[in-house]
Image (spheres, grey):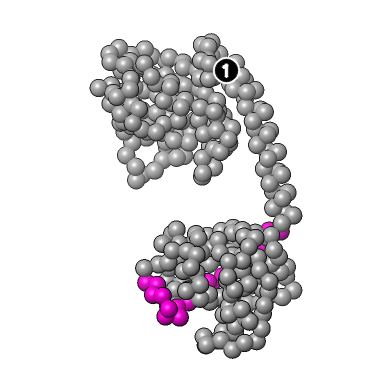
Amino acid sequence: MKKFYKLAVLLVAASTLMVGCNKSDIPGFKKTKSGLHYKFEVCNDKEAQVQKGDALVVEMTLKLDTTFLTSNVGSPQRMAMPQESMFQGDLSEGLLMMHKGDKATFAVEADSLAKFFPMPDNYTPNQGMKMYYEIHLIDIVSEEELKQEEANFHAEMERRQTEEPTIIAQYIADNNITVDPNADGLYVIVNKKGHGPVVATGKTVRIDYTGRLLDGTIFDSSVESDAKEGGVYNPNRPYEPLEYVVGQMALIKGWDTGVMGLPEGSEVTLVFPSALGYGNAGTPDGTIPPYSPLRFDIKVVSVK
């Protein structure tokens, strides 16, 4: 269902506006010449109108006839307008009618949608079913604004990439770290040397960890006290060592490489560049920004 919702949203296409006064068979609705049914609850015709190439910030509820499918009311999302129309009477025609602040409902022929996208289970072809889009257009981001956003983003990424080596070097100097990094820039600072079996591919290990940005911000931890200190405590998760089979769990390279060969009981600090962490993307939630070098404090609790 979520997949369908995302695809249906993307059906917003730039098309020629064909508004007419045709009679709709849906009570309270009007219909354009192309067959799009529409009804406006709020019309702010003095505000900016949607143009091709804009991005729209919307709250939207999706229904198939009277069956509720999904909604993001209360959590507005940005959606881009594709450049090509897929069929006559698609949602794009309605969106191009809207102004900032408008509230409207558009009814699209479900049979037309079904030619391009997977449909929900309650869809029956050739029955005249309609997909209803209840839309509140909260804001319009113009094509020019989008281009400026993109330019600003690329400039920021270049700045972060350029500054990363300096940030790492300053951290190493400020913390009096004297060990040499490996060829990839990974520093392994041994705080306590363990004794016993060593971490190796195929071994089952249990590891306590706390991950930080180099400014000290904690973004994740298996240690309850650290999680609380860093403001990332989640009462719904267990705070205990992470157990995994080495080589069978996807880990960031800095962690994976840094723990290899460590004896049971070892306590180490790993410092490494973003290339060994989350790279130029960071994490989806923004907790770890792009080009962020990381520090992990790790304790190898057991190796079997």
Q: Nearer the viewer, residue 111 or 171?
A: 111
Residue at position x 68%, y 40% in the image:
154
Label 1 neighbourhood size at 10 Å, few (<14), some (14-19), many (20+)?
Answer: some
In percent of width and height, residue 240 lies at 31, 33
Give the left or right position of residue 178, taking residue 143 as reference: left
Q: Secondary structure at mark 1?
A: helix
Q: Which residue is mark 1?
A: 172
Magenta stretch bounds: 122-142
Asked if residue 170 shows in the view, the reply is: yes
Task: Indicate the quadrant containing the N terminus: top left, top right, bottom left or bottom right.
Answer: bottom left
Q: Amino acid at mark 1?
A: Ile
Give the left or right position of residue 163, taking residue 119 as reference: right
Residue at position x 65%, y 87% in the image:
21
In percent of width and height, residue 77 lies at 56, 58
Q: Nearer the viewer, residue 143 or 89?
A: 89
Q: Is residue 107 above or below residue 217?
A: below
Residue at position x 53%, y 20% in the image:
184
In percent of width and height, residue 114 lies at 46, 69
Task: Indicate the quadrant containing the C terminus: top left, top right, bottom left or bottom right.
Answer: top left
| Quadrant of res 19 | bottom right
